Amino acid sequence: MPEVRFLRKWVDDPNQIKIETAMQRGYYNAARKAVLEMPADAVIDLVKGAGLRGRGGAGAPTGMKWGFMPKEPTDARPNYLICNADESEPGTYNNHELMLQDPHLLIEGMIISAYALRVKKMFIYIRGEMVLCAKVLSDAIAEAYAKGFLGENIFGSKFSTDLILHRGAGAYICGEETALMDSLEGLRGHPRSKPPFPAVQGLYGMPTTINNVETLCNLPFLVNEGVEWFRSMGTEKSTGTKIVSVSGHVNKPANYEITMGTPIEELIYDIAGGIPNGRDLKAAIPGGASMPMLPKEILLKTNFDFESLQAAGSAVGSGGFMVFDDSTDIVQVCEVIAQFYKNESCGKCVPCRIGTDFIHKIIGRITHGQGRPEDINLIRGMCINLAGERMMDSRSFCALGDAAAWPIIWGGLKHFENEFQYWIDNKKSPVGQPVGYPAAL
Amino acid sequence: MSRYPVSRSALGAALYIAQEECGGWVPHEAIYDIAEVMNMEPADVQSMMSFYVMYNKAPTGKYLIEICQNVSCALLGARRLIETVEHKCGIHPGETSEDGLFTLKAVECSAACGSAPAVQVNGLFYDKLTPEQLEALIEKCRAEGGPKENLYNAAYAPDVAARNGKG
């Protein structure tokens, strides 16, 4: 299955950020159709029927999430919609590209969602680092207001909705939906306990739905083309397309939109151009740094969709596909990942605050040639303290703790324990990388 | 403040405005000013500011160089770029050069992994930089005053094609 172009159809055209250009290409027709011709519940049924699953990481069915929202919100207890544009999962840059090159697709998707969920105020929580993106989006929002697609009585209907762009300020944890809401309320971005789920008690204590950028961008296509078309792509339980951000050791690192179920072998060798410098594939992380890496043998017989990757012991996650060639030292990769989670742990709960630091210190000691024989068991124990003995058996407050442990215990240690052992026994890298900080990594 | 259902939500934006007006960081006095305008305790403002890395707690140089140190960039030589700046400007990550021109930050994934190693100077992306190109960029900043607004578009537009494997 080759690369497809629906969400990414116009991202190469610099003029696409202008509303006139976008409208010439049929943008906002779907929103108009939904608002003027469809009952709100019909839009929700469309999403349920299509089997659209969240593209942000967890892969929860979007229709189910929407179904929990109150059908008749009041002024005292309004519904809110938040677009989670806090894309900070290492290896992922598809939301970034969509918002930067095609902001009107997201705005249209949000109008449709707001209509379906009876939302009068919606927010885009955009990552603070994406300055240029925020500028493009705020210009696009102003254009949409000027055309009457946002604000009072949109498309001449009785439906009114406002869109507010909110910039984060640099915290990975704010991609976690409850921490995002705290951050949007002007607090430190600490996660909240679930339940109550956001659909019951979310932003300002009101019912809230939080969807990823790519999820919302699927909405205009769903309204225009319908359920059958959407289900014709992908597999039974993973419908539609997914934008995969391929990076690392490939000839053509870029975002590629593929139908769910595309073989990973095809993604790496055909679509992304294969491994450069005549080297061989060693491993890859399929869904952003939080997800366990898979070695070559497993990758080559796995397809890219929710079920196949789960069966293989990893996940679609955010679609950040990082490829490692055979010169890569997996222990050093684990060190970089551990360092990231140490830096980004919010500090709310002890297992994560202390655990991430210890994991990083122990792996760092190994890659500095000071590993001790007991270190592998020590790392494993630390990871179990964070994320439990099985996947989805979390012991930390939020998913960041799982995300910190999974790539180490279910990725690096599971498939490449021999490399950890080699480092500890020989005080040097099994693939000849220098000792110390991963300088030439 | 009136855009939000609850005014405290505007605190993040207020800190950005303060940072811009104070030349790239949030001094102690600004925290009191914000607290007064927003009818909050200074400690609340401080607690918000101290959590987020993008509010600078100390003066920054004229050019903020941010280099991604995460996996994809590390694989493709980000460390060498950090060493280049360390060597060229005499600063380590988190420090500002004595002449007040450069601040170096080693940041986490800046969502530009397709053009790794990702480097941002004052918010502008520079794609697939080699150490030599980064050296030249630093020299250019010193000699001609470097990027502020004008490179915003130039830095992004050409790479659209490259990013999609055509360039």
Image (cartoon, helix red, strand yellow):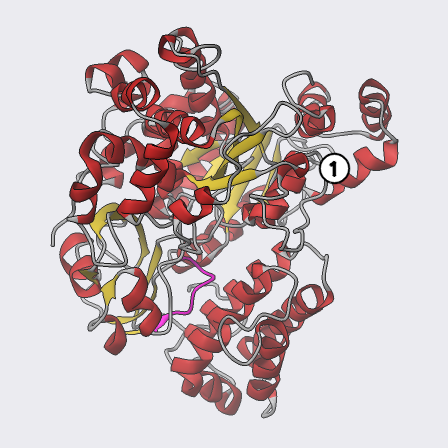
Quadrant hosting residue A108: top left
Residue A324 visible in the current orientation: no
Residue A318 visible in the current orientation: yes
At 33% from the left edge and 40% from the top edge, which residue is drawn?
A45
Relative depth, front residue between B127 and A267: A267
Across and down, in percent, residue A396 comes to 64, 66
Quadrant hosting residue A357: bottom right
Across and down, in percent, residue B89 comes to 59, 41
Across and down, in percent, residue A222 comes to 25, 36
* Label 1 neighbour load within 10 Å: few <14, some 14-19, many 20+: many
Q: Is residue B53 above or below residue A266?
A: above
Q: Secondary structure at mark 1?
A: helix
Q: Amino acid at mark 1?
A: Met
At 59% from the left edge and 86% from the top edge, which residue is drawn?
A375
Quadrant hosting residue A57: bottom left
Region rendered in magenta: A288-294
At 54% from the left edge and 46% from the top edge, which residue is drawn?
A175
Q: The N terminus of chain A lies in which quarter of the figure? A: bottom left
Magenta span includes B156: no
Q: The C terminus of chain A lies in which quarter of the figure? A: bottom left
**What residue is disc 1 on?**
B49
Q: Is residue A261 above or below residue B137?
A: below
Pointer 1 chain: B
Across and down, in percent, residue A48 comes to 33, 45
Relative depth, front residue between A249 and A342: A342
Most common secondary structure along the magenta stretch: loop
- Drawn side of residue A437 relative to residue A60, left or right: right
- Drawn side of residue A281 relative to residue A397, left or right: left
- Drawn side of residue A215 relative to residue B26, left or right: left
